[in-house]
Image (cartoon, rainbow, N blue to C red):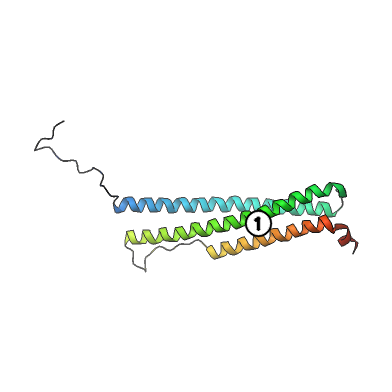
């Protein structure tokens, strides 16, 4: 259709560069996604960790009561020792991910403050307790290392320890 001189021009065409509203929406969307992933990871991880510690302690107490024949203990000991080592590696990887994700979140919050032109007084601030989470991960890893050491005791010194 040819353009006539008196036809209105459509001013709703997209700009060649995204406007501040689009930039703000994109940054906010990434921030929301990051927070949702971190929340989901924490919930699932804490559920797994609680179950895993409970299973470790249950099976350890079962072995210490001599309900399992000595010959049948070794595969169980090896399995739980390896699972505990894998748990420590998982905690280390999750700690790294959470640290990097929160650093990105801090950058996104800074960018949103710039886009909104907030003064320092009214600026958004990140609320995730990164130091607390990182410390918690260390304690969780130490807990799994202690339990892995108990599995070594079960494997090699169980009878001797009980005899003392």
Asked if 139 appears above or below 51 in the picture, the reply is below
Q: Which residue is mark 1?
A: 88
Q: Residue at x 45, y 58 (%)?
A: 105
Image location of residue 74, percent across then percent down: 81, 49
Could you tell me residue 8's position as x and y percent?
14, 39
Q: Residue furthest bottom?
A: 121
Residue at the spot x=82%, y=51% of the render?
A: 62
Q: Residue furthest top?
A: 1
Q: Position of residue 159 (x, y in %)?
A: 88, 58
Classify 10 Å Cα crowding around label 1: few (below 14), some (14-19), many (20 and above).
many
Question: Secondary structure under badge 1?
Answer: helix
Q: Nearer the viewer, residue 156 or 108?
A: 156
In this view, the residue farthest toward the right is 163
Q: Quadrant of the C terminus?
A: bottom right
How many numbered marks does the figure carry?
Answer: 1
Query: The N terminus lies in which quarter of the figure?
Result: top left
Q: Position of residue 111 (x, y in %)?
A: 37, 59
Q: Residue at x 49, y 51 (%)?
A: 36
Instruction: Judge left or right: residue 71 versus residue 90.
Output: right
Residue 87, by quadrant, is bottom right
98 to 12, vertically: above or below: below
Q: Nearer the viewer, residue 147 or 152?
A: 152
């Amino acid at each position: 259709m040819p353009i006539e001189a008196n036809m209105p021009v459509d001013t709703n065409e997209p700009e060649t560069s995204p406007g501040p509203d689009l930039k703000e929406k994109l940054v906010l969307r990434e921030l929301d996604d990051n927070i949702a992933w971190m929340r989901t990871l924490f919930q699932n991880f804490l559920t797994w960790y609680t179950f895993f510690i409970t299973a470790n302690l249950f099976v350890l107490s079962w072995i210490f009561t001599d309900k399992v024949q000595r010959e049948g203990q070794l595969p169980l000991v090896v399995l739980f020792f390896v699972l505990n080592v894998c748990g420590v590696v998982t905690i280390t990887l999750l700690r790294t991910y959470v640290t990097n994700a929160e650093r990105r979140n801090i950058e996104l919050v800074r960018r949103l403050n710039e886009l909104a032109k907030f003064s320092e007084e009214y600026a958004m601030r990140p609320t995730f307790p990164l130091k607390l989470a990182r410390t918690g991960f260390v304690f969780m890893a130490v807990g799994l290392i202690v339990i892995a050491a108990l599995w070594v005791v079960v494997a090699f010194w169980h009878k001797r320890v009980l005899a003392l």
